[in-house]
Every structure is written in C-alpha cells, then in structure tokens.
Amino acid sequence: MAEEEGPTVELRQRKKLKSSENKESVKEEKISDTPIPERAPKRRYSVLLVLEAVLRPKVVLSTSGPDVLFQRFAKIFIGCLAAVTSGMMYALYLSAYHERKFWFSNRQELEREITFQGDSAIYYSYYKDMLKAPSFERGVYELTHNNKTVSLKTINAVQQMSLYPELIASVLYQATGSNEIIEPVYFYIGIVFGLQGIYVTALFVTSWLMSGTWLAGMLTVAWFIINRVDTTRIEYSIPLRENWALPYFACQIAALTGYLKSNLNTYGEVHEVYKIYIFSLFLGYLLQFENSALLVSPLLSLVVALMLAKCLQLNVKKGTFIAKIMKVIKFYLVCTLTVTLNIIMKMFVPHKENGHMLKFLEVKFGLNMTKNFTMNWLLCQESLQAPSQDFFLRLTQSSLLPFYILVLIICFLSMMQVIFRRIGGKSLKETITLEDGRIGGRPEIIYHVIHTILLGSLAMVIEGLKYLWTPYVCMLAAFGVCSPELWMTLFKWLRLRTVHPVLLALILSMAVPTIIGLSLWKEFFPRLMTELMELQEFYDPDTVELMTWIKRQAPVAAVFAGSPQLMGAIKLCTGWMVTSLPLYNDDDLLKRNENIYQIYSKRSAEDIYKILTSYKANYLIVEDAICNEVGTTRGCRVKDLLDIANGHVVCEEGDKLTYSKYGRFCHEVKINYSPYVNYFTRVYWNRSYFVYKINTVISFQS
C-alpha cells in the first residue's frame, strides 16, 4: 500500500493542471520525483490522506467517481435525517413532558386554560376570539378595533401584542378541517411545539454548516436539551412571543451562515445581505402598522451608510500607503454617515422617544435613583436582573461554558489576527484550507463571533435575554470542538512538532465531541427519562372556583379590577372586561397597573374607590398572595414598592416607616367596618381570593 501512494498523489496533482498548468507543473515534478527514504513517514502520510478523504469530501471530490459521490450523498442524507429526527424527537419530548406535568388530557377546558399564566393567557384568548368570529375578516377587524378587553379603551391588539401567530394559527385550524379532528388548544400548542422542533433543527444545521460534520449538530441538540432551563421558556409559558419568533430567527441564522460560507471571496455578494435586511425591515414596517421605530433604528442607518460607502469605494492597489489611508477614510465616512442619517431620520419621521427605556437603564446601572413604582417593579422582575451564579454553574456542570469560552477565544484571536494582517497590507490566501490554520478568516465565523459577543453582553445585563444567547452558545461550542480547522488554528499557534498537526486536528475533531457526548449521555439521559416518568399535577382549585363563580354570578357587562396577571386569566377563562392587562409596552396600561395596584397600599377607602370607579370597575379582586407576600426579596414586594412610591417608607439606611393614618387597604377591607363597607361589599371569597362589589350608591361617612 505504501508504494502505491506516490502515483495516487501524482494523479491528484495532475487533475489540478487543467486550471493552472504553468503554476503547478513544478510542484507536480517535485511530488512525483521526490524519493521516499523511509516506510514509516509514508505510512503516516497514507493515514493522513485517508482521514482527509473521510472527513473532508471536498478534497476527494476533485477525483470524483461514483463511490466518492455516493459517500458524499450518504453523508448529507444521514446528516439531514439526523437533523429532522432531532427536531421531531424534541417536539415529541415537549408534548410528553407537558402532558405529564399538567395532566392536560384529563382536565376540563377551564382547568387547561388556567395553565396559561400572565400575558400568555392574553395571547391565547385572542386565538379563541378568532375561532369564534363569523369570518376571518370580521375577526381581524374586531382585534384591530378592540373595545371589549380593557374598559374605556380601544386598542389595536394585533399591533400592540403582535398577534400574527394567533391569526395564522386560527386560519390553519379552520382551513385544514382540524376543527373536526382536534381541539383548538391541542392544535395551538402542537404548532408551538412543532416550531420548537424546527428551532432545534435550525441550530443543528447551522452548527453542521460551520463545522462540516453533523456530529456538531447532534452535540448542539444535546446541550440545548440538557440546558433547556436556560435555553427556552416553553415549559412554563407556551404562547410567549419568543416561542414563535426564535425558530424563525434560527432559520435566518442558518440561511445566512450557508450564504456566507458559499460566497467566501465575493465581497459584492455578501453585500447583498444589506439589501435583504433593508427589504425585511421595510416589510416589518408595513406589517407592524407603519412602526416608525424601525425607521429611526441606528442599525438601519448603519446599513445604509455601508452601502453608500461601497458605492464610493475606489480601486486602489492593496498594501500601499494610499490603500491604508482609504481604509481610514472609509471607516470615518461610515461612522459619520451613520450618525448623520440617524439624526435626519429622527427629524423627519414622527416617532416616540424611548425615554422610559433610557431611564430604566440609568437606574439599573446605578446612575440614577427613582421612587417610581413601575420602574422599580420592572427592575425587581427576575428576567430583567443580571444572571445569577446558578446560571453559570448549570452551564459549567454540563461542560458547555468551558468549551464555549475556549472556542470563542480561539475564533476571536484568529479573527483579530486576520484583521490586523489585512490592515497591515499583508496578502492573504483567498481560499482557506485546513493546513492554513486560519479559522478567523472565514466570513461566517466572523459573523457568529461578533453576534455571540453582542448577545452575550446583553445577556450579562438582562437575564431574560439568556434565552437568545444560550442556544447560540450551544451551537458555537459544538461547532468549535467538532471543527478540525479550530484545532489546527490552535496547533499553529503552539507550533506543534511532535505529531503531525493536521492528523491530530482531525482526530481531536472526532474524539473530543464523542467523549463529551458519551459523558452527557451517562450523566443526563437518566434524568431526562425520570422527568418523563414522574407524574406531576397543576392543582389550583381556588382559581378554578373563582372563574366558575364569575361565569355563573357576575353580569355579562361587569368590569373586574385586580392584579394584571389575574386580569389576563379572567379575560381568557371568562371573557369579561378588565381594567388592566399584563402588558408593558403601553404607557397607559402601565399607569393603569400602578393605579390598580394601590389596593395593596396604605391608602384610604375613598381614594381606592375613586381610582376604581374612574375605570368603570364593578368588581374588585384582592389576592391574599400579594397582600400577605413574604417570600420575595425584601424591597421587591408589591406593597414595599407602593410604600416607597407613596412616601410611606424612607429610602435610606434602616428604611424607617413614616406616619400614615390609613392601614393597608387589602387588610382593612377584609374587616368589614366603616368606611370600607360603605364603598365595597364582599360577594365571594375563598382561601386565595376576596371579591368585592363596588357600590354605586355611597354614604360618605367617616
């Protein structure tokens, strides 16, 4: 076998002569005529060629034959099959876990709907409304001119709550005839679980495209599922907007990765991404009812500036002093144009400034202080705080974080090395090979490194954004450990001599992910199976009793007031009108929420009565869990935040209470003494909820 290696290599080199005979003729003679002194080096070279043939089919494809073509087709087929199977298995896992957790199939419709908590209840309620509408057109009109949800307020629910998923789901449910086969709730959650399967498949494909092996895709899926507490909120809130959006985002990332990978040397065609972005943004502008915030986005100004700078670019010989000066001028031009265009857009495009967002960031970073209830309440939400140590500990225990850091460091340093070489005017090979050890020179790698750093920076500030970053971490870490080019880049820096670096890189790109996979299987697979076997139960009889009473006893035209989270459940389970909703992108709703929350403050009965009647409320619901809240962080309880906002607590050392001649309303109203009984009449109560009818005829006695 060793003696046959010479002619094989010679034949391969002659195949390349068709494109450049003059440049390769000398190399061909050297390869064919060079004597081989020993058998051991020849054997090592033979093994290297075999491994390259197995792991890098692009090289062998130059000696194309039926067998090689079949091997490549088989590899692609198996990879695609593994990707699709991973997505389907994950969707089935979610469905089985959801059933075991909530006993969904054994519950009545009301009990099923109660499992949708907070804003998730609002989204699903509009899906129900669309199914009840006499026609699709009428249903859309009622949602865009909705005056049956919030009292004294007409809202465009489609625009304000991004209800396009519910519109599409309702159309599919009726158009496919599924109303005769499956219940609406199963169809709805089935679509969401299916999208999660697509999400996982897209992450699989992205990692596969970057590394060249579907083994990376399998490792991505494994890390994603094992760390699902930090990669998705699908288990707790199915209708969340992120559960609809992230699968499409992952598909876009996969498509862009494939595009950048296939256009390595054509700057003009990568340039096409800018045009695609502008088209997508314009389409979003129309679908979001002419959302002016998209037009004044700094990112849009940057993209336009880059396109203008490309048009003004001159053809200058690379590496010269003039070329370096032109690069500096181009950078300055892009920055100046970006700022100028953004200022012009803000001058001529009517838009609403995000002042509350800037104030939120100022308070979060300690640059300012506020007593505002809404601001402090948002800052106390777990999803808007910085990630806890438990988050990093979980990622470390699954070995994800250490490998991610290793991959990110190597890719980032290699990228910076390439950038500085180009700035210095050094010529680089257009086509990057494994032997070059220059992984940071690939466009798709540069894109993903920048992207993951930006997402990671945001996730370090706001924990809720970890659900956008952690799946990226899974994908990038899996790509890195399965990529021979990454290991080769590292060995180039280490100047490895004892073992052939290419051979070692190919071996490690298979051995390391295999070892990781086996260790993950041994440690975490039994846990996943145990979770599926455990019988859990969502038991909330008090809420069921409350909703049942409302549907049976309350007038159809009644308006209910209470915490926004409970109001979302009432809207879904009963259809009755409410005073507020758990939505935080509308200033008026935020102000309503703050005013309604005053029922847990130290305010007089008359003050509370005036607030509630100003929103035409007929019934008030007091939640014992909020009134007697003890479990959350000190200073973040609703009643604490209200006391601070109302001046009943001094925000200094010791937190001294100031005098208030009124007791806490939620406590006092339960005692049934004047003046509280003059304004409110208790009509229903259980262990968790107290319902009071707001009297229309009042005797104002002290």
Image (cartoon, helix red, strand yellow):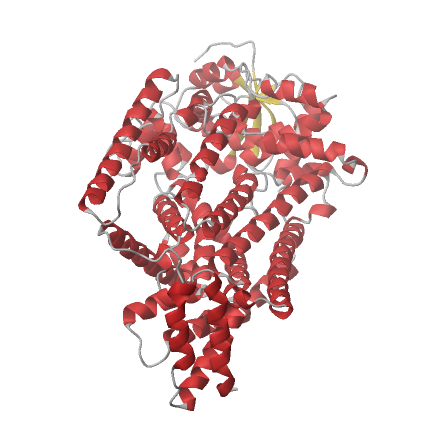
Task: Tell me the quarter of the picture where residue 530 sits.
Answer: bottom right
Report the side of 311 relative to 678 (left or right).
left
Outermost residue toward the right in this view: 180
Report the side of 699 relative to 373 (left or right).
right
Nearer to me, 299 or 696: 299
Confirm whether residue 631 shows in the render. no
Report the side of 510 relative to 347 (left or right).
right
- Which residue is rendered at x = 50% and y = 74% of the image? 11
Residue 644 in the image: state x and y as whole percent. Answer: 32, 30
Report the side of 424 relative to 683 (left or right).
left
State the quadrant of the C terminus: top left
- Which residue is rendered at x = 38% and y = 68% of the image? 435
510 w.r.t. 275: above or below: below
- Which residue is rendered at x = 46% and y = 63% of the image? 398
Residue 555 in the image: state x and y as whole percent. Answer: 67, 18
Residue 410 in the image: state x and y as whole percent. Answer: 33, 61
Task: Tell me the quarter of the picture where residue 591 sits.
Answer: top left
Nearer to me, 561 or 297: 297
